[in-house]
Image (spheres, rainbow, N blue to C red):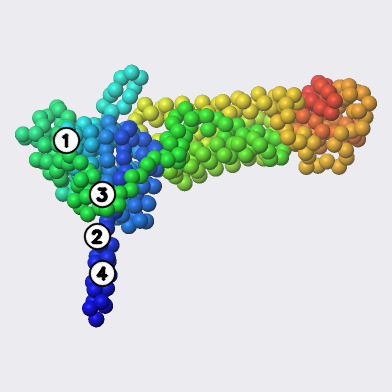
């Protein structure tokens, strides 16, 4: 009986120690807040929730960063069921202050500061304050975050709006930045910690998981940069345009789809791209396809222009957020427009040089209405020279590759420029080997 009692006590002690064995997750933001910060926080919060972590500590040493990214990160912190603690190891300024205020508890390292959160935009070499509309929205976000955890909301507003004054703390016209002691006095600090590890030990935390940035976070940061986004747009659209205009499906289409998928994947993860962006892009692609294959095979009309506008709106919508500055929005329009222009121009140049390239990947001999030989036998005798000046008719749409009929013989042809619909009278203007370049027969030539 004594042994049984001792064993039971031992089991109870072990169970008790298991209950007290708490674990903490440490997430560090020691650089500017950007797109990668959002994916980093999302991964860390999800893994902490799945592991039933007892506390999530956000270690902050940041001068601020992108406001849209900070707002999305704020939403992640508010939605988590894991208790959150902000530890300001150096400074939590601007967007960093918003993240700190959104945590349930705030601790400072000696010398830590928090505040100076008025939104600013970079215009050339100048830094300008955001319009009143953006300042008002940001001030409300700070106020709501403070009220969420019972902190004085006017102090949070004073960090954003220099027109807010608080007696004995900040005068009107000044922007509030709190020191460790001021934060403690005004309800924005739960104390000063010389060592975070010591405090965690005091809380009974036996396991600490230091969560690190990984390749995915860095990749998202890279793919959402304006320059890279513009390159993805240009290459993605170029690949799709080539596939639209040339029969078959090849490497260009795969590359185009991968580039566009990478663009929307990265912007979706950071909370910018949604289904509306993808819907605009899809609608634009459908309009362009209708323009090329249904409405006209020669001229690029209103349907094609509407398609390009929808495609541009889809990309633009995926790159801007509610707190994007007018200057940044204009820059985004320029990036999207440049990507569209570059892709269309390059596609036109490549198609104009199609007979001299290998981009067709076999598309040259692909036809929807081939009933004879792909390569007429008489081409092997004279190298195609006999075809110069021969007149015929397009028996399929030339986009630009198709089939023409000349005196009862069918042959693969390529139109010189643009597209020609089925039934168009044509004339061979260049023949080299198996390649025959044709153009529309003019009315005067018909006579």
Q: Nearer the viewer, mark 3 or mark 1?
A: 1
Q: Nearer the viewer, mark 3 or mark 4?
A: 4
Residue 10 badge: 4
Which one is earlier in the sequence, the residue at label 4 or at label 2?
4
Cα separation, mark 2 vs mark 1, equals: 29 Å
What secondary structure is marked by label 4?
helix
Above or below, 13 against 104 in this view is below
What secondary structure is marked by label 1?
loop
Q: Provide the residue designation for mark 2.
A: 20
* Residue 364 in the image, given as x and y percentages of width and height: 77, 34
Cα separation, mark 1 vs mark 4, equals: 43 Å
Above or below, 129 against 50 in this view is above
Above or below, 447 against 407 in this view is above
Image quadrant occupied by the C terminus: top right
Q: Nearer the viewer, mark 4 or mark 2?
A: 4
Which one is earlier in the sequence, the residue at label 1 or at label 4?
4
- Taking depth in this image into account, of 219 and 359 the one nearest to the observer is 219
Residue 110 badge: 1
Which one is earlier in the sequence, the residue at label 3 or at label 4?
4
Q: Nearer the viewer, mark 1 or mark 4?
A: 4
* Residue 444 in the image, given as x and y percentages of width and height: 81, 21
Q: Provide the residue designation for mark 3.
A: 84
- Taking depth in this image into account, of 356 and 437 the one nearest to the observer is 356
Q: How many marks?
A: 4
Above or below, 443 against 287 in this view is above
Asked if marks 3 and 4 touch (Cβ < 8 Å), the reply is no
Residue 447 in sight from this viewpoint: no
């Amino acid at each position: 009986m004594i042994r049984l009692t001792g064993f039971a006590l031992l089991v109870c002690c072990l169970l008790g120690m298991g209950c007290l064995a708490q674990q903490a997750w440490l997430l560090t933001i020691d650089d500017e807040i950007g797109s990668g910060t959002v994916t980093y926080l999302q991964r860390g919060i999800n893994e902490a929730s799945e592991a039933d972590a007892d506390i999530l500590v956000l270690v902050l040493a940041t001068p601020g960063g992108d406001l849209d990214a900070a707002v999305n990160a704020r939403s992640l912190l508010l939605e988590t069921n894991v208790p959150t603690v902000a530890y300001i190891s150096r400074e939590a300024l601007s967007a960093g202050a918003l993240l700190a205020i959104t945590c349930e508890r705030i601790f400072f390292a000696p010398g830590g500061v928090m505040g100076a959160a008025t939104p600013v935009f970079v215009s050339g070499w100048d830094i300008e304050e955001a319009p009143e509309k953006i300042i008002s929205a940001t001030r409300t976000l700070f106020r709501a975050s403070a009220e969420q955890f019972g902190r004085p909301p006017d102090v949070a507003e004073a960090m954003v709006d220099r027109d807010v004054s608080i007696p004995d703390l900040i005068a009107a016209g000044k922007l509030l930045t709190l020191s460790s002691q001021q934060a403690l006095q005004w309800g924005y600090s739960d104390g000063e910690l010389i060592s975070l590890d010591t405090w965690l030990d005091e809380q009974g935390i036996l396991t600490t998981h230091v969560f690190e940035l990984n390749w995915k976070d860095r990749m998202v940061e890279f793919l959402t940069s304006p320059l890279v986004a513009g390159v993805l747009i240009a290459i993605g659209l170029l690949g799709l345009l080539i596939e639209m205009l040339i029969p078959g499906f090849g490497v260009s289409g795969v590359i185009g789809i991968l580039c566009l998928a990478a663009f929307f994947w990265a912007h979706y993860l950071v909370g910018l791209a949604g289904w509306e962006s993808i819907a605009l892009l899809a609608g634009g692609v459908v309009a362009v396809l209708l323009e090329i294959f249904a409405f006209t095979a020669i001229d690029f009309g209103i349907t094609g222009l509407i398609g390009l506008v929808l495609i541009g709106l889809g990309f633009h919508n995926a790159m801007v957020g509610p707190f994007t500055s007018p200057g940044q929005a204009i820059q985004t329009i320029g990036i999207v427009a440049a990507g569209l222009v570059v892709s269309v121009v390059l596609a036109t140049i490549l198609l104009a040089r199609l007979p001299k390239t290998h981009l067709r990947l076999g598309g040259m001999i692909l036809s929807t209405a081939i009933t004879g030989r792909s390569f007429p036998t008489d081409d092997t005798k004279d190298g195609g020279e006999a075809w110069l000046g021969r007149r015929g008719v397009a028996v399929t749409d030339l986009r630009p590759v198709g089939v023409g009929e000349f005196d009862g013989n069918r042959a693969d042809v390529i139109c010189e420029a643009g597209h020609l619909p089925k039934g168009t009278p044509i004339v061979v203007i260049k023949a080299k080997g198996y390649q025959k370049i044709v153009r529309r027969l003019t009315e005067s030539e018909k006579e």
